[in-house]
Amino acid sequence: MKKGSFIGLIFLLSALSAHAQYTSRLGRFSVDEVKGCAPFTVTILNTNLLSPPPSPQQCTAGFPCLMTPGDSGPTQQNQFTLTYTQPGTYTLSVLYQNIGADDIQITVDPNVQPEFEIYTCSGFQTSIKITDKTYDQYFIDFNNDGTIESAIPNSNNQTASHNYGGAGTFNISVRGRDINSANNCAAKIQSFTALPVLPTPQINTLTALNSTSLQLVFTPQPNIQYRLEIGVNSGTVFQQFQTLYGVSTVTIPNLQTDNNFYCFRLSSFDPCTNTHTYSAPVCSHNFDLSIENGNNRLTWTTASVAVVSTEIVRNSTSYTIIPGSPNQLNDVDVECKTNYCYQVINRYAGGGRSISLQKCGNAFTTVTPTAVNNVSALVASPGVQLTWQQDPAFTVAQHSISQGKPGSGFSVIGQTPVQNFADPDYTTESGNCYRINYTDLCDNTSNQGILVCPIRLSASIDNENVITVRWSGFKGWQSGVANYQLQKFDKSGGLMATLNLGADTVWVDDQPDDVNQVLQYFITAQPIQAGLSNSVSNRLVVTREANLFYPTAFTPDGVGPVENETFTVRGHYITRLELKVFDRWGSMVYFNDKNEPWDGTNNGRPLPEGTYVWNARIVDFAGRTFTRGSTVVILKKKN
């Protein structure tokens, strides 16, 4: 114990023992104490201060007194010991039989264990700081053995020190007492471990809470006083910022974390020698996020001393860990219209971490998507079905289908998120074409799609039933058509022929055929580029004509060639023919519904020479019914 502390102790102990008793208001009785901590016991020492012998003695069995404690307790005769259990100010009264009452004021204080801080010093020393303000003075027992080694009056920053001379764990007791007060207040006891040297502290985490606050977390050792130092935009130049004791977390406000970085170091402070044992510094980040086209750019500044690695956290998940202390990252692995939040975490040798503010932004991309350049068209009945391929590098939000004629403008007729579309209103006769455009998920519009014109198949037939099939070349594939394939079907859909025609767009069907009056044709375009579906034309149905053949005169006289002896109406593809013949007066002279020849008679009677009118009702293979008619002349051979 220091010499000054010992002198102060003697002075305080003298002040405390200067009054052995206290006299009542009228001087008739005395008590041992008038102030103390609850529970507080007061003893009445003498009730005859004004009645010395041989005067009759008061407050005896012969002359009893009434003692009233003043705390709502009962009044009793000759009660010389009174105990007060509750803090407060009370009037202790003694009522004498012959001379009246006298009293004294008793003060009972709350029984407060005084607060104090124990600081570890090197060399097995300790320093005690009394932080309590309750009492007038405090008594320190460094070994809790009843020996008061130090006494401290109530004032700011009063300390006392002690050297234990070796390692060990000790109990330190501190009791508070007011002047002119009983020494009955409770002591507070705390344990202390003496150390040869102070441990080196370590900052566990430094976290940016917001744009103005940082939070520092460390693991404090018992009874160590710490000093926190700060460096602004520097990891080597520091100034004292705050004294810490008994805490593991500290929040530093009123900063500008978006404009500066801050470095901190923590010291174990030795108040006995006024020396420091420093931790390694840990620094915050001046962190910025810039959202660019297809790139989220992260930049930050900090002091790189002792940084082992840098971790980037994206959307609460570790994204990448980079050795050392870089100061930027370009994140190109982003999707447009997606929100990304980032933090930068520096990891230090020894396990410390510094966590930046979180910065967030919505990614965007302004790349123009490639055009739809490969579209296939399948003409249906009715309408057309379009299917296409689209660059997989772009994710489509919506396809837009436009219809029109080249040179006349196009208008949007529908939208779809998928790669096919049906236009039920398309007709081959309209000659309409299409374009497919789209917007991607980034709201970027593609380049204009290729012109798509379905195959339009048509045919003409001459008097000889020769069919000429024509079709428009398909448009819709960037690399074009490799081959046109024509398929020919009968009326029932049975395949009759398949012809590969190369690049031709005309084919003549001049093959004689007395069986198939109704024919069907399809054109299939096959692409040069692999992986595309074929395009198919409209279904074309062609019906050949019956083409009737009949003579204009015949000689039913039995003397000429046989073929001139009868009249017959013939043709292709006829299933039924009903023939009627009329004379010049309009009377029917012949009827037959079996397509049998007329021999120029009426009911077996030869008819005279002359001109007759005939009429035929015909049903062909196609099921069509029609009539034809003309005149025929009966000739007789002249003798």
Image (cartoon, grey):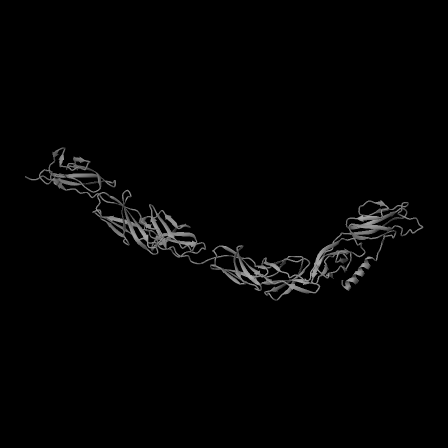
- Which residue ends up furthest to the left in the rendered image? 639
Q: Is residue 601 left or right of residue 424?
A: left
Q: Determine whether 152 is above or below 564 in the image.
A: below
Residue at x 38%, y 49% (from the top left corner): 421
Q: Is residue 174 left or right of residue 31?
A: left
User: In terms of depth relative to the viewer, which is nearer, 639 or 419?
Assistant: 419
User: In terms of depth relative to the viewer, which is nearer, 87 or 283?
Assistant: 283
Residue at x 72%, y 59% (from the top left corner): 129
Total numbered badges shown on the rendered structure: 0
Question: Where is residue 610 drawn, in percent x and y?
Answer: 12, 39
- Quarter of the image for the C terminus: give it: top left
- Quarter of the image for the N terminus: give it: bottom right
Q: Determine whether 610 is above or below 31 in the image.
A: above
- Residue 189, can we see it? yes
Q: Is residue 116 left or right of residue 442?
A: right
Question: Where is residue 313 drawn, in percent x and y?
Answer: 53, 57
User: In terms of depth relative to the viewer, which is nearer, 150 or 154?
Assistant: 150
- Residue 472, can we see it? no
Q: Is residue 233 left or right of residue 607?
A: right
Residue at x 61%, y 64% (from the top left corner): 231
Question: Where is residue 104 drawn, in percent x and y?
Answer: 84, 51
Question: Where is residue 361 drawn, in percent x and y?
Answer: 51, 57
- Which residue ends up furthest to the right in the rendered image? 54
User: In terms of depth relative to the viewer, which is nearer, 242 or 124?
Assistant: 124
- Which residue ends up furthest to the top in the rendered image? 603
- Which residue ends up furthest to the bottom in the rendered image? 237
